[in-house]
Image (cartoon, rainbow, N blue to C red):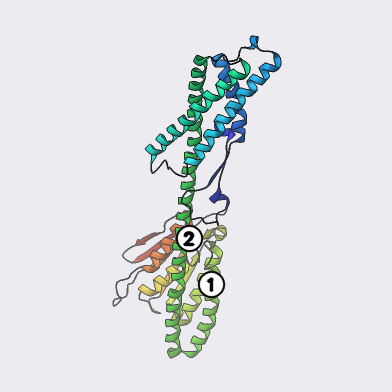
Amino acid sequence: MYWLFFYYTDSKRMNPEKNTTNTTEKFQLNDIGFRLVLIPFFGIAVPLLTHMIKSNELGHWELKLAYGYTIVIALIIWQGNRYLLFSLRSYFNWFNKPIRKIIALLFAVSFFTIPASSIMLVGWYQVFQGGNVDWQVIRTATLIIMICVLFITHVYETVFLVKKSESEMLKNEQLERAKAEAELQALKNQVDPHFMFNSLNTLSYLIDESPLKAKEFNEHLADVYRYILQNNTRDLVMVQEEVLFLQDYFSLQKIRYGDAVVLKIVLPPEIMECIMPPISLQILAENAFKHNEFNIHNPLEITVYFEKGKIFVHNRLTKKTNSKTSSKLGLLNLHERYKLTTSLNIEVVEGKDSFIVSLPVLKID
């Protein structure tokens, strides 16, 4: 229940952009509610348990002053030990030096609590009992106070350990997220040069073969590349956008190959409102052009269809006879981007005469 009295803040969490050279994190623990309840409680409970204050021997106002005095003792003991506890946190770490931490806490708490409690309890007897000190009561009260202090110290340390653990978990999550974002950006940056390299090769070929087609190809290329630039910073796009981009990209290939390439898209209208990583369908189409033999008599047909929550991209497999072994960088890039942005995996099935890649899509809640 004591957790209800703590309000905890982490200065790094409150000020994430602020850097510090101090290796010890600055924690702020607002325990005012905890202290407001327990300091008066202990200040009254300890005298009652030890029978130090006898109500029949004191007048009304003397009784109030007597309990006020013991509450002040509880306040001083609490605040002193709290200061020691907070000070020692910067010198000893539970994770690195747990034994030293325990020994330091025990010595610090004991050397402050026992003398301070004894002196103030003797003072109480001087004020309210005319100097008639009951040493047995003082020993018992000091022992109870010491036990209470150890318990409260344990509570504080438990809170700090839990919050420290939460802070470390948050920090690790932030580091993992930053790492994933950096990896994703690196993968995105690979798309632009890869696409431009292939497009410029195609344009170079068309300039020699057909200058008019080269001009038309260049005009379409500007529209296609605009899509890449606009979506380079986005992690997910609508399926409809991807389909339109694939059609624009395919129009470029039609300029070069004519009827030797065929695109069929069979997707239900509701799928268009789902989302997926950008430039996914284009990479698969480009992969098909790169690794297959095709001509006007034996065209390359790419079919895009939907089944069981996934978009499938299928093409007939007729590998080029003189092609080098594929590095599959395009598929690896797509696989990594999918995993980083959706936590889902793509599936590649290569048959004897077909090549199929399935891409999961996400519904917008």
Residue 203 location, quadrant? bottom left
Q: Along the line of sight, which residue is nearer the eye, 52 or 198?
A: 52
Say if 119 sits above or below 156 in the image: above
Q: Amino acid at mark 2?
A: Glu
Question: On residue 229, which mark appears?
Answer: 1
Say if 15 sits above or below 207 in the image: above
Say if 342 sits above or below 149 in the image: below
Q: Which residue is rendered at x = 41% and y = 38% of the image?
A: 101
Question: On residue 78, which mark appears?
Answer: none
Q: CA distance from mark 1 to mark 2?
A: 18 Å
Q: Along the line of sight, which residue is nearer the eye, 290 or 142?
A: 142
Residue 230 horizontal side relative to residue 302, left or right: right
The image shows residue 79 at horizontal and vertical percentages of 56, 34
Q: Along the line of sight, which residue is nearer the eye, 204 or 191?
A: 191
Say if 19 sits above or below 322 in the image: above
**Residue denoted by label 2:** 181
Give the position of the N terminus as an image quadrant: top right
Q: Which residue is rendered at x = 55% and y = 66% of the image?
A: 241
Determine crowd level at label 1: few under 14, some 14-19, many 20+ residues with C-alpha closer than 10 A.
few
The image shows residue 112 at horizontal and vertical percentages of 49, 31
Q: Residue furthest top?
A: 56
Determine crowd level at label 2: few under 14, some 14-19, many 20+ residues with C-alpha closer than 10 A.
some
Element type at mark 2: helix
Element type at mark 1: helix
Q: Amino acid at mark 1?
A: Leu
